[in-house]
């Protein structure tokens, strides 16, 4: 199988997953995903989470929030926080996954876009953490 054929298969699978989600008729979930997606715009959820960490978890929470803010983005923020405060990373990753799904559910992104964004966010957070440690 050539790279072109593989890419075409991946694109078809991505479109099929998107179409399957778009066909769901779940008004309550539609409303919830729409609210979650809007709440996550402009990193509002990451900023609020970071503020809570800084206010409630002392010095370690402030360092975790800083690591998350330096990383930026949903999965990047959760990954950055988890490096310093692993217990806080779990609910933030769950939130990031919910936001990622909300982007697909509301028709803003294809599943492949969300997966690529999540992997990019994780990589950026790890590289940012590595660069900060080297300084």
Image: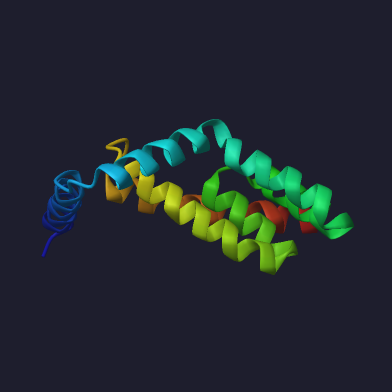
Q: Nearer the viewer, residue 85 or 25?
A: 25
**Quick check: 55 left or right of 89?**
right
Q: Residue 57 occupies which quadrant of the picture?
A: bottom right
Q: Eyeballing the image, is 48 above or below 98?
A: above
Q: Nearer the viewer, residue 21 or 30?
A: 30
Residue 5: percent from left, percent from top: 11, 56
**Quick check: 56 left or right of 97?**
right
Q: Eyeballing the image, is 116 above or below 86?
A: above
**Quick check: 114 left or right of 16?**
right
Residue 122: percent from left, percent from top: 53, 56
**Quick check: 56 left or right of 20?**
right
Question: From this viewpoint, is residue 30 visible?
Answer: yes
Query: Residue lying furthest front in this view?
Result: 28
Query: Residue lying furthest right in this view?
Result: 59
Q: Residue 73 occupies which quadrant of the picture?
A: top right
* Residue at point 69%, 43% (across, down): 69
Residue 59: percent from left, percent from top: 89, 56
Q: How many marks?
A: 0
Q: How is the image coloured?
A: rainbow
Q: Eyeballing the image, is 11 above or below 35?
A: below
* Residue at point 37%, 53% (across, down): 115
Which quadrant would the N terminus be assigned to in this image? bottom left
Q: Nearer the viewer, residue 106 or 119?
A: 106
Question: From this viewpoint, is residue 126 visible?
Answer: no
* Residue at point 58%, 61% (across, down): 91
Residue 47: percent from left, percent from top: 66, 39
């Amino acid at each position: 199988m050539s790279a072109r054929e593989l890419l075409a298969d991946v694109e078809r699978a991505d479109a099929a997953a998107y179409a399957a989600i778009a066909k769901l008729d779940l008004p309550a979930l539609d409303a919830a995903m729409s609210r979650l997606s809007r709440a996550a715009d402009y990193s509002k959820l990451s900023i609020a989470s970071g503020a809570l960490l800084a206010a409630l978890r002392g010095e370690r929470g402030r360092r975790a929030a800083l690591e998350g803010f330096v990383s930026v983005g949903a999965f990047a923020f959760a990954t950055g926080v988890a490096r310093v405060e692993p217990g806080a990373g779990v609910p933030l990753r769950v939130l990031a996954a919910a936001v990622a799904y909300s982007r697909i559910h509301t028709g803003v992104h294809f599943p492949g876009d969300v997966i690529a964004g999540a992997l990019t966010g994780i990589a950026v957070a790890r590289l940012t953490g590595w660069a900060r440690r080297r300084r």
